[in-house]
Amino acid sequence: MKKTSLNDIAERLGVSKTLVSLVLNGRGKEHRISEEVCRKVIELAKELNYQPNQIAKGLRTGKTNTIGLIIADIANPFFGKLGREIENEASKHGYRVMFCSSDEKAEKSKQQIGMLMQGQVDGFIISPPTGSEAQIQELQKRKIPYVLVDRYFPQIESSYIVVDNFQASYDATMHLAKQGYRRIACLSTQSNLINMNQRLEGYKSALADSGLEVLEERIKTVSFTHEKNDILLAIKQLLQEEKERADAILFTTSKIGIMGLECIHSLGVKIPDDVAVVSFDDPDAYRISNPTITAIAQPLTEIGSQSVKVLMELMSPSKEKSKPQKITLKTNFIVRRSSER
Amino acid sequence: MKKTSLNDIAERLGVSKTLVSLVLNGRGKEHRISEEVCRKVIELAKELNYQPNQIAKGLRTGKTNTIGLIIADIANPFFGKLGREIENEASKHGYRVMFCSSDEKAEKSKQQIGMLMQGQVDGFIISPPTGSEAQIQELQKRKIPYVLVDRYFPQIESSYIVVDNFQASYDATMHLAKQGYRRIACLSTQSNLINMNQRLEGYKSALADSGLEVLEERIKTVSFTHEKNDILLAIKQLLQEEKERADAILFTTSKIGIMGLECIHSLGVKIPDDVAVVSFDDPDAYRISNPTITAIAQPLTEIGSQSVKVLMELMSPSKEKSKPQKITLKTNFIVRRSSER
DNA sequence: TATTAGTGTTAAATCGGTTTAGCAAAAGTA
DNA sequence: TACTTTTGCTAAACCGATTTAACACTAATA
């Protein structure tokens, strides 16, 4: 039992496939196809359960109704939730989503973008890893629609949807300072991505504005692979130096935060008595942790829906020349027990 | 700057596109194309950065090198991690993954499968929701390759990869009984899916084998939408009846578990002193929870890789008649603090 | 010398749609 | 009656690859 094609319907009715195509695309009236023929075509199509072959359609029209999503890791709840929001919004526009996890590796994302560029997607939503500038510029050059999320490259004119990382980090650090913490540390990733830099800057700025010293030894970074040992080492260094012990830690991602919390627990250090904790992102884990963890929640629904909307505009043939849309959203600071004095 | 096509290369070299196609597919030797011409073609292809249009290729060959993944929710870490493993394994075979979140709704998965069946994917990996039997049978009838994961329908002959839910649940309940818990409750989903049924059966069986009574009022179910209020209510009922208070709870999914733990905390009930907890699945949250949560971890890497491997076999034209592969994997029981007396 | 075998290459069909350009018949107009 | 317009429909090109069938030409064999 083969799939029915346009031709099958055309032959069965003794009409041309042009006619069938027009009718089924609702362009029957416009092309003055008689009511009766229209009816017959539609009936038979329904009867044979005709489903147009999207590949054939795509080849002719150059549209696939698919968007490519390049993120660090779909298994990371932050990206998982973002992916879900993107899927939802895309679906509203009749689009499907193909996802690729780049593991923050530029070579991987390059290969993935290259693969999907071979006529498989109409546009991209990308969370670009360090060192992927050239790939983004290539998309730009080839006029392939794309939107960046979570981070962007200031030197490349792109549409992007991000959050105000500086402000979020500043506010979180200020919160800690106001709670009376004086030796506030920051645990972040070794990365020159703008979002991470801004988080670090916000932290430093808040310390300065609170009259607290910015000490390099209180700023630890771990690689993007997040080796647990690195994190354990960093936390030990922060917490076990007798006199200058950190009394609060700001984690700049939930992945670091979760591993960091594990380490803190394993060292037998008490939160918030021995050390307060605040973290970017708000995974489920932070709500069932004991104590609950103060979090900087990102508006994932809005990031997702906005990124799809902006991409849809870029892909619509009408406004080709519209300027890149640069959208910065606010985060939601949720105070919980981990930062209470 | 348009993309270069086979024809461009052919014209530039004054040869036929047949030749170019053969050479670039490595079938030059086989077709006795001269060394020199081969070299030229390959060189020019590289120079022009030729990337074959996968849509055109797909139309002709009927292969898309894409698999469709239908799961409940990519934002749920269980499915997120599974999705990631599937992506990894698929990539090894040169396949891409399109994902759809069905929210456990049969209509949604039907629409999604229908959509992807229109020539967009070569096969499916599906975690079928309640009531989706007809869709699966339709795939069967149309001879579209598919593999089920996490659950299956006993009455439909399919390949599937699942875990031994009965045993896992039995062992977990036995563990609680051996720790001395006597009033072990179970919080599950309202669902007739086989995996959930088996989890319930394992629980009951272990109670019986431990000489404990199976009380219907100790088995609570909540809808798949996981209304927080439902869970709170169920937990209250389990924990607040004075004399017959449950002293342990088995959660049958991590989603219920996480929400359940939130409720338990909010009620001020202490784990494991007031109530012990064991849960299916092992999200990050369980490791940073305080106390850490005893978990039934599923072998996601293996489920993912196996499902792709089985699907690859089904899609390979060679062995058409091979029997459905029914694979049941073992879970990994991880004892943590939440079930320690 | 005629036939066969081997070599290197290509024209054309094909996949299943969409789109362009246009045709024949009927109806309307001068 | 002759010309134009409208109506209703279709042939063929096209998208960009793969694949089939075959065509020249040379070399080898009978």
Image (cartoon, coloured by chain):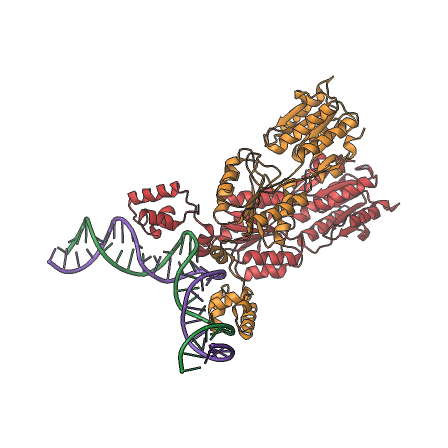
Chain colours: A red, B orange, C green, D purple
**Quarter of the image holding residue B297?**
top right
A118, A305: nearer the viewer: A118
Q: Residue furthest right?
A: A242
In the picture shown, does residue A82 fall above or below B16?
above
**Where residue A98 sits: x, y (%)?**
56, 49
Point 49% across, 46% down: residue = B117
**Where residue B240 sits: x, y (%)?**
71, 20
**Where residue B127 sits: x, y (%)?**
58, 39
Q: Residue furthest top?
A: B243
Looking at the rendered image, the quarter that the C terminus of chain B falls into is top right
In the picture shown, does residue A4 fall above or below B216?
below
Could you tell me if residue B252 is visible in this image? yes
Point 67% across, 36% down: residue = B164
Could you tell me if residue B267 is visible in this image? no
**Where residue B280 sits: x, y (%)?**
69, 34
**Quarter of the image holding residue B171?**
top right
In the picture shown, does residue A323 fall above or below B154?
below
**Quarter of the image holding residue A40?**
top left
Figure disc tally: 0
D19, A221: nearer the viewer: D19
C15 left or right of A269 in image:
left
B334, A338: nearer the viewer: B334
Point 37% across, 49% down: residue = A8
